[in-house]
Image (cartoon, rainbow, N blue to C red):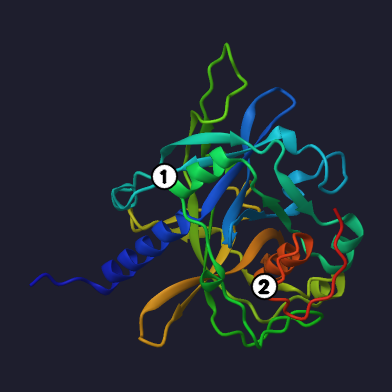
Amino acid sequence: MKLTTTQNFHDELLLDMWLNISKSTVQIFKYTYENKLRGHGSGVLFQFEDNYFIITASHNFIEKNGFVGEGIDDFWVGVENFTAKDFRVGGFRSESVIFSLKNQNMLGIDKSTYERYKIDLAIIKITSQALIESLKSHKSFLSLSDISHYPKQRILEQYNKGEISDYYILYGFPASQTKVITNKYNPKVKDGEKILNANPYCQTEYLKNNVSKKLIEEGFTNHIFFSEFKKGYDLFSHQRKNKPIQRGMSGCGLWEIHIDTKGKPCIKLVGIFTEVEEGFGISVKLPFAIYFIREYWGLEKLPHYGIKIRLGK
């Protein structure tokens, strides 16, 4: 009989969860003015019927102080494939295949809607069959059963208090931990080309119910707030380390850990991480993303949640 410590059990549990989360998370890239491709943001994959989407943060696509709507041709998405072995030996770095987001269908939130509701979301509908097939081969699209709908959760004009869980996982791709490798004689990559090594970052977070009054007054009433920590626990060295700069994490998922009816720990996507304000990490509640997909693409079988927000493009 092999015995395990409480800490080892906790580590193995988190590793299994991270592996599942990694399959549904992608990295977004952008060419800089110096014509260099760099890590720019993160996104979560979602599928409904035969429709495939990337849910991310709208500010990832801001151009010249205007909200999303133009300039998507400059953006790319990476498709990497992590294995259980990669995680358990600490070998997070993995080559990615990159695909252009050119000609994909995108919904962003107009400036007036953002200023009123602080809902910093963008939805990309994937139309490239090559990208869809690559994602289906190496990644995993979430379905409605993989997200938390919170049927009794307050959606509009109320802040979070006494939610179902206070234990969360944040998983995304800091730009500082991504090394882009391109041919110096041909800096422009092609669809399907392997070009980079990316080291994703994952941390556990705790819900904060005592939200700053200033944030509520500024309009952050459709969000989930969690503690911002300067250090995190490294599963492999068993030491606390300074967290990397989180630039590039915007648009990644916030995942709730809860116990199902059979006593088994499981995870649900509950929000999209967008920013840090007043010492709080802030994520837009996931139902808004589902609602926007429903309204913009006419998928009436998706839940409505009673939300009434006029969409911009």
Relative placement, left or right, of 289 versus 243 is right
Q: How crowded is mark 2: few (under 14 residues within 10 Å), some or many (20 or more)?
A: few
**Could you say which quadrant of the image residue 215 lies in?**
bottom right
> Element at badge 2?
loop
What residue sits 87% from the left and 39% below the top?
Answer: 64
Give residue 301's mark: 2
How many numbered markers are drawn? 2
The residue at which mark 1 appears reads as 81
Is 280 drawn above or below residue 38 in the view shown? below
The part of the image, by quadrant, that contains residue 308 is: bottom right
Name the residue rendered at 73%, 34% in the picture. Answer: 73
Tell which tag, 1 or 2, sits nearer the viewer: 2
Q: In front: 12, or 237?
A: 12
Residue at 87% over, 57% down:
312
Q: Is residue 173 at all visible to an observer of this figure?
A: no
Amino acid beneath label 1: Asn
Front one among 253 and 147: 147
Residue 147 in the image: above or below residue 84: below
Q: Work out whether mark 1 precedes mark 2 in sequence or the reverse, and give the earlier one.
A: 1
Q: Where is residue 71 in the image (x, y as percent from the top left)?
A: 79, 37
Q: Do the residues labelled 1 and 2 touch (CB within 8 Å)?
A: no
